[in-house]
């Protein structure tokens, strides 16, 4: 009840993450997204409904969470997450769930979480594949997102809206984000820090790569 979860992205990952956190009784949830609900979203973004097509995704998420647990305080911000907004929100946040769909925002979120020593559960999905990483800047041995994915990397960005995604993949990864967030909030179990968890739904195959903190990481090496 005392926890404050910040969810960045109200789409395929953010939908199940918000629903499970709300159902679990997280007292405050802030959802950030600048988009509106489109009919094509409904195949994979389960918090939205055909009645809410055209409305903002953050307001749609709020309605979905309140339909399950009206006592959750849901704050909605219909805008893109940037460094200034994150610096404003994170000092009061217990945990951040990165459910966005672009590489630049993932690095902005990671850097902000490192600055404010806020635990982060990041996930991504495309086509039939997904990945999950838990970053806990309070743990001096926990690598950050930039330790694994260089911020300066240049490549052609692919998004679910154009390249497609197998809907249950985002449902699976978003649910796992909620699970890892709840574990960190409750102080139970072993969080998936120091690992990159990968999911191939075509073969129902899970693989885990052990990752280490980089001593020369441009983001977290100065926060050891």
Image (tube, rainbow, N blue to C red):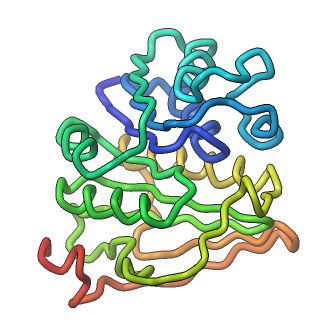
Residue at 44%, 80% in the rendered image:
149
Quadrant containing the C terminus is: bottom left
Quick check: 195 left or right of 65? left
Residue at 63%, 46% in the rendered image:
175
Indicate the position of residue 132 as horizontal and vertical percent values: 55, 64
Indicate the position of residue 195 as horizontal and vertical percent values: 48, 75
Quadrant containing the N terminus is: top left
- Residue 110: image quadrant is bottom left
Indicate the position of residue 60 as horizontal and vertical percent values: 61, 22
Residue lying farthest to the top in this orientation:
70
Residue 177 versus residue 32 in the image, above or below: below
Residue 176 versus residue 201 in the image, above or below: above
Quick check: 173 left or right of 122? right
Residue at 38%, 36% in the rendered image:
5
* In the foreground, 165 or 206: 165
Residue 77 versus residue 115 in the image, above or below: above
Indicate the position of residue 87 as horizontal and vertical percent values: 20, 46
Residue 201 versus residue 186 in the image, above or below: below
* In the foreground, 53 or 124: 53
- Residue 89: image quadrant is top left
- Residue 10: image quadrant is top right
Q: Number of labelled discs?
A: 0
Quick check: 86 left or right of 9? left
Residue at 79%, 35% in the rendered image:
42
């Amino acid at each position: 009840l005392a926890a404050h979860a910040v969810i960045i992205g109200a789409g395929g990952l953010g939908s199940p993450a918000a629903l499970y956190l709300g159902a679990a009784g997280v007292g405050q949830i802030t959802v950030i997204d600048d988009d509106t609900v489109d009919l094509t979203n409904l195949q994979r973004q389960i918090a939205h409904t055909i009645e809410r097509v055209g409305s903002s995704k953050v307001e749609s998420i709020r309605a979905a969470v309140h339909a399950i647990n009206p006592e959750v305080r849901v704050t909605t911000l219909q805008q893109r997450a940037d460094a200034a907004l994150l610096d404003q929100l994170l000092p009061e946040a217990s945990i951040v769930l990165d459910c966005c769909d672009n590489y630049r925002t993932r690095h902005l979120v990671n850097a902000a979480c490192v600055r404010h020593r806020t635990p982060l559960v990041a996930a991504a999905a495309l086509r039939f594949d997904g990945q999950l990483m838990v970053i806990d800047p309070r743990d001096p041995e926990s690598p950050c997102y930039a330790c694994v994915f260089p911020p300066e990397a240049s490549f052609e960005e692919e998004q679910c809206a154009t390249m497609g995604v197998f809907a249950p993949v985002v449902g699976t990864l978003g649910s796992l984000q909620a699970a890892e967030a709840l574990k960190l909030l409750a102080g139970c179990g072993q969080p998936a820090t120091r690992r990159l968890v990968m999911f191939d739904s075509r073969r129902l195959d899970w693989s885990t790569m052990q990752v280490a903190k980089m001593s020369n990481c441009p983001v977290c090496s100065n926060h050891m």
